[in-house]
Amino acid sequence: MNGERLFIGLLLVLSMGCHGPTAQGSDDRRFLRVASREDVPSLDPARGYDTVSWQFEDMLFSTLVDYDYDSKLVRELALSWTASPDGLTYTFQLRPDVHFSNGRLMTAADVRYAIERVLTPASKSPGAEFYRGIEGAESCATGPCRVDGIEVVADDQVRFHLRDSDPLFLHKLAMPFAAPVPREVVEQWGEDFGRHPVGTGPFQLQDWRAGQRLVVVRNPLFYDKTRPHIAGVVQSVGVNRDLEWMRYDIGELDLSAIPPPEYPLVVRQPRYQPLLRQVTTMRTQYLGLNCNRPPFDDVRIRRALNLAIDKDKLLRLVNRRGVAARGILPPTMPGYNANLPGYEYSPTKAREMLRETGWHQTEAIELWLRNDETTVRLAQALQQDLAAIGFVVQLKPVAWGPFLDAVKSNDLVPMFLLGWEADFPDPSNFLDVLFHSRFIGTNNNTNYRSAEVDEWLDRAARMTDANERLELLGRVEERIIADAPWVPLYHPVDVEIISTRVHDFRLHPLRPARFDELSLSDTGS
Amino acid sequence: MNDVGNPFLKTGLILVLLLAAIAILAPWIAPYDAVAPVADSFGEPWPPSAQYLCGTDELGRDVLSRLIFGTQISLLVAVVATILTLVIGVGVGAVAGYLGGRVDTALMRATDVVLAFPGLLLAIALAAVLRPGLTSMFTVIALVSWTGVARSVRSEILSLRERDYVLASRALGATDWRVVSRHLIPNTMPTILTLAALSTCATLLLDAGLSFLGLGVPVPTPSWGRMLSDSQSYYRVAPWLMIFPGLAIVTAVLSFNLLGYGLLRLSEQKQRR
């Protein structure tokens, strides 16, 4: 999913003092108080595919399986599951006592309906691709969606029949796309379901004022009566990271990221030490080069850019919260190749290589990026490095939503600065979704196209031997690095700080932080 | 300038000339490049030192050099936008004042409409629509700030057009254009000059404000407002990033203010004589 966590906003003055009337519950000590710069793009699990949306979708919806803090799959709505020896059939025994927040009992039919909905082209779900391997999924492309490969055995039992064995199938069911949704509510609201979401999660939506705040409250019907421990979560919207940190510091928020300028001061202060939480994410920040657009249709120019970037300098701008990236896969990902040579930083070689291509720059090339302070700062560092080899770049800062739309287009954006965070701990979640040509227009934003890479990826998708598969995917990564549609920059480490009244809070290596397991004490700020 | 009793004019003029000199001579007097990194201070700005008089920023750039080159942008925007402001303002004001009647009413109501918008908000809206860059800055600033000039010039013309020399000129068969351009506008010159200097102050502030909001010239072109805005998250770690651009803006605005006030005093003294 497209990641945005570490980033910081600007427009401090605009957002100051305009967070509207006091939220119902925002003064309530039983609510967790958080803030974000931008509104949640969607609360419809079929739609949202970014860290901000998933943070709240995780609260409102549940999936059959989920991840523990070691990124291992554990049961959630499913009590147990079995897979057939050939890997083509999965049978899930569901919890019998799961209710939607509107009071209706959740059954196996809802599991089927949710996936059929994602597969229906009309839902415009970015997740449809993940479920095409289920028998009958092709029916959705043409006519009414009847995915017979999802067999409703009983109200509390569902069986999936796959066309080919898929080692990632369980991971795909852990994505919010596959979260059961109540058909009657979806049909009542249609396109607006994302504004009136009803799910089986530990929380339910209470109030959402676009651009101002979002309030979720405890779902009394949640199957696990011990959770959540808090009454709800109040998210103030339009709070950039500087303001978020200031409001945290005066005790108005319970959770905050730490802006890079302040970070050295924070780590030096003993009182903050017990409040810091840190996690190594499965994320890669990169500079994407649109292979469709001159001059990046020339692989030599893409390679020259790879040699030109000083990644250490970028890391210094984020207080070394991260490690330099040589390849595409983050270090915590299975199949990570620690010996991948990548490209060394060598402006002289880069300049030489650029000169050899005989290319002459006639106008500055636009580098698109998310309009927030840290990203703009990182982009300026890139701009400096590229200027040093005689490659002139002009920055184009854009708001998050329009930016994500723009990079999907064929030739609007020549180069862009973005991050990708793993949806599940498997290298295909980077290599396949970001570089296979069938993802052009959705997630393959560099428009990278290689028949060989496509073929290898398709072959890997059917492989059952884990080691062989990782080896093949390793070859894919090496080839992509050689073709250089990306300049991999760094793998961030996320650091968040909690208020003294928050207990049992952990950051998750794979998913946005969860709020259903933490508790709040009455003391502390 | 034989007037020793007008220290405002002198001080203002000297400061403005000094700023102009800095802007023109920037490439020669700036110690370093304003865009490329010159110090190894990435992520941790260096405080002022003998080598970097105003310190360096988090991208390794020399703050003093950026301020000096920033003078170019700020003065250019201020001067060009002020000229545009005057062209629109004097044009509207003169036509309204001289023709009077329905034309006057129409033009002045239009002016009121523009005045009714909060200036900065209107500027933000316009700047968001236009492509970022110098031309947009000129246009945006001129479009929101001509109203004051129009009103002052109109009232001045209203009183001037009834003067005998205007009547005489018209009796001699002078065209409207000739009356306005040869008699009325030259006689409003003291007012216009004062307005120009004062409007430059407002323009400088608006430019800084828009740049602060990220709507000015694109990065990494040095601009005072942008430097101020970039520095805000470093205010505890590296206050020099905030102090120096702030001082630059204050100095420039003060210079033009002194000049404007000096001119105002000068014209008042002349009238009294």
Image: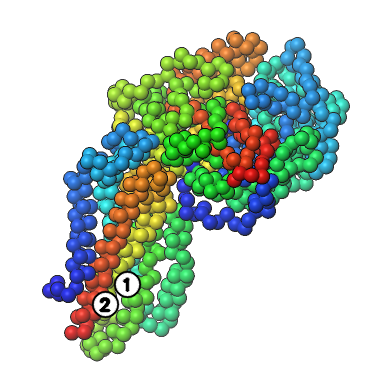
- Using the numbered discs, state the Cα–Cα distance from disc 1 to disc 2 in whole angstroms: 10 Å
Query: Can residue A486 be seen here?
Result: no
Mark carried by residue B90 = 1
**Label 1 neighbour load within 10 Å: few <14, some 14-19, many 20+:** many
The image quadrant that residue A90 belongs to is top right
Q: Amino acid at mark 2?
A: Thr
Please give the chain letter of the residue carrying mark 1: B
Residue B71 in view: yes
Tags 1 and 2 touching, CB below 8 Å? yes
Q: Position of residue A290 (x, y in %)?
A: 46, 31
| Above or below, B157 relative to A39 | below
Tell me, for residue B188, which label it has, or none. Answer: 2
Task: Inspect the image, locate mark 1, and give the three-letter code of the amino acid beneath it.
Answer: Val
Counting from the top left corner in percent of width and height, residue B59 is at 35, 38
Q: Quadrant of residue A166?
A: top right
Q: Residue furthest right?
A: A154
**Residue sitting at x 36%, y 60%:** B205
> x, y (%) of residue A304?
36, 25
Whether labels 1 and 2 share one chain: yes
Q: Earlier in the sequence, mark 1 or mark 2?
A: 1
Q: Is residue A111 left or right of residue B216?
A: right
Q: Residue furthest left?
A: B2
Kindly identify the residue that appears in the image at 59 percent across and 45 percent down.
A525
Q: Dot 2: what SS?
A: helix
